[in-house]
Image: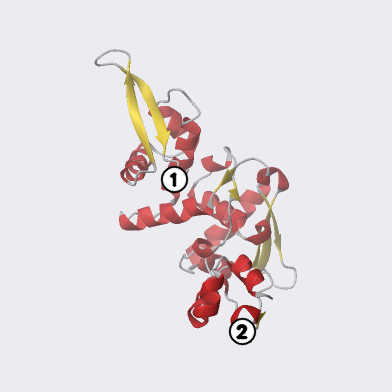
Amino acid sequence: MTLEEVAKRFGVSEKSLIGAFPRTQKSILKKWGLHLIKKGRGSGAIYEIEEEKTDARALTLYNEIKDDIAFDEESIKLMTWPFLVFLTIVATPMLVFRGSYEDFLNYIQLNVTKENLDELKVTLQELSDNEYISYTIDKTDENYFVAALYRKREEQMHIGIGMVKTCKEIADSAHKRSWVPILKTWIGMQMMAEKKLFKREDLIAATGLSLYQVTESKKLLEENEIFKTTQVYADYQMCIGSTVELNGFYN
């Protein structure tokens, strides 16, 4: 590959490839699992991949390089495990995950335990039964499977993978066990932004979350300036709903 091709493929600058190749090489290996080799000097150098992963999948979901991932309004009402598994599949290259159940848990950075393995298998089957994904267990090795997004789901709605990373950072800083309610609330607020007024009950219905989860997630998102809500009153004491203003930097 040429300098320009490598820079475009991995989202790195040509300057870093020329002047800081060892550091850039390590970054690509960590993020993509690919070992880049440089032959020659300067802008005329040729680059080769020593051993390329067939699916070009990043080491974890949070390192995945993808502009957006498909999501629809119905999908955000899924419970936490189905939501997370569905989100993971649509975040992978070509909207397909192929590997072992252990690979999947490592990809989403969950501990490989019997409980998590059992939950994952049940969730994959439920998503398949409800036509969110196709799910096929390898006939030659029952520990391997292929899960892929159905086309109709791909065409409906898009959210950025950057949202996932931001929600995970917010959850980590607030010592929350899961970033999923935060992401679901964020998507719900995007939906509320299309309304002139919305009530808390509307957000709960749209996300499928509990009152506590919505309240906590909304508070964290506002504290991180993802959006701003304003209460609207019919008179000095009767609140009739709220409006939301999304931060254009994030939304």
Q: Secondary structure at mark 2?
A: strand
Is 229 positioned to the left or the right of 74 in the image?
left
Q: Position of residue 102 (x, y in %)?
A: 56, 70
User: In the shown orientation, is residue 206 left or right of residue 97?
Assistant: left
Q: Nearer the viewer, residue 237 or 180?
A: 237
Q: Vertical placement of 173 versus 28: above or below?
A: above
Query: Image point 41% across, 40% down: which residue?
Result: 247
Q: Is residue 69 above or below residue 29?
A: above
In the rendered image, is residue 146 in sight?
Answer: yes
**Kind of residue at badge 1:** Phe
Left/right of residue 208 with respect to residue 58 in the rendered view: left
For residue 249, the mark is 1
Residue 112 percent across, percent down from the top left = 49, 69
Mark 2 and mark 1 lie on one chain; the one further toward the N terminus is: 2
Q: Give residue 55's mark.
A: none
Describe the colour scheme in one phrase: secondary structure
Across and down, in percent, residue 39 comes to 64, 86
Callout count = 2
Q: Pointer 1: residues within 10 angstroms few (<14), some, or many (20+)? A: few
Position of 44 compared to 187: left or right?
Answer: right
The residue at the point 45 percent across, 56 percent down is 165
| Label number found at residue 38 | 2
> Can you see residue 35?
no
Q: Is the Cβ of the residue at disc 2 closer than 8 Å to that at disc 1?
A: no
- Residue lying farthest to the right in this orientation: 139
Residue at (49, 54) in percent of width and height: 162
Q: Residue furthest top?
A: 235
Q: Residue furthest front?
A: 43
- On screen, residue 146 above or below 176: below
Look at label 2 and name its amino acid.
Lys
Label 2 Cα crowd, 10 Å radius (few <14 / some 14-19 / many 20+)? some
To which quarter of the image does residue 242 belong?
A: top left
